[in-house]
Image: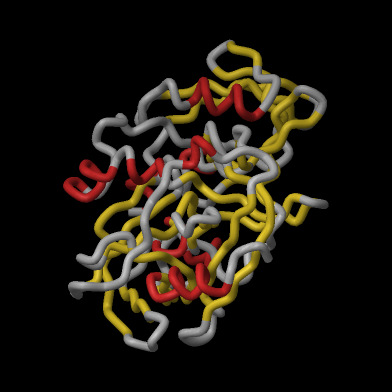
Amino acid sequence: MNASIKLIEQVLPATVSIHSTVPQQHPSAMLLGSERMGSGAVVSAEGYILTVNYIVIGATSLQVTLLDNTQYDAEIVAQDFASGTAVLKVVANGLPSVPLQPSRDLKPGDDVFLVASSGEDSGRRVNGGAIMSVAPFDAYWEYATDRALVCTAMNPGPGGGPMFDMNGRMVGITYLNLNEVGRFSLAIPVENFIQHKDELLRYGRRVSQPSRAWIGIYSYTLREHLVIAGVLPGGPGDKAGLKAGDVVLAIDSQEVSDRRKFYDYLWGKRAGETVLFRVFRNNSVRDIAVISGSVEQFFG
């Protein structure tokens, strides 16, 4: 750990523990559970808190605990499904907050440290490491980002906590544990919030970005083909008849060779538009028309 004790003590009071309660019938509950613990950071003295969206999707009750054990009820004021971030608000003034710093100057080899809730009380855990990559990243659940902060520090607690540079500035929001050799955590660059702060806080979402097509599938690339690993029950793909094990040969007559190219093409369409999948299943080729949906509406 290269961060000094003084630096860590400086940022800890602005970190929070998050507890969310989600109704069992909400579509996210079967994936993420109905009781979720998360981490976050206060980013303004007015009580705005930055975290990851999957902690709070569908939440009907949110409690935030500060380092001194003070608890607040919180509300969701913004959700950005494209970046995977969310903003909460507590009714409080004068809270300690962390400075935000765009990650554009970070490069492989730079030291960072992560802070997370202990997951059980007001305790905090800290872990340090080095940036390994700032490359694009795509995931199996219709998610991609052009810049991801991958580091050697293992996330020490629930997701959503801040990633700091060695000046105590928040540069990212810890999103995933990668469980790869030498590559332990992935964070969303904080500029995803900085650049869209005004519209997120005003409208609760990215209104400047039209709602893009969403299918509700999980996928991976195998030998230059996209394979469907699973479908979300009740999602557009499930309703249309896509199934786990389908090999996607083309969409709208466009060949599909990898997952990111599939996402780029899909997101060029708007929610509600029909996407024609040509898949290989049980030794035969079939065409399946999927009326795409909106992930915001499905999980809203």
Q: Residue at x 61, y 50 (%)?
A: 186
Is residue 144 in view from this perspective? no
Say if 181 sits above or below 24 in the image.
above
Q: Quick check: 119 left or right of 257?
A: left
Which colour assignment does the render follow?
Answer: secondary structure
Q: Quick check: 192 left or right of 45?
A: right
* Nearest the eye: 122 or 98: 98
Residue 216, percent from left and from top: 51, 42
* Residue 89 sits in quarter: bottom left
* Residue 225 sits in quarter: top right
Residue 167, percent from left and from top: 49, 56
Residue 175, percent from left and from top: 55, 55
Q: Residue at x 55, y 56 (%)?
A: 166
Q: Quick check: 250 left or right of 46?
A: right
Q: Quadrant of the C terminus?
A: bottom left
* Nearest the eye: 243 or 38: 38
Is residue 131 in view from this perspective? yes
Say if 275 sits above or below 123 in the image.
above
* Residue 194 sits in quarter: top left
* Nearest the eye: 266 or 42: 42
Say if 115 sits above or below 148 in the image.
below
* Nearest the eye: 240 or 224: 224
Residue 287, percent from left and from top: 60, 21
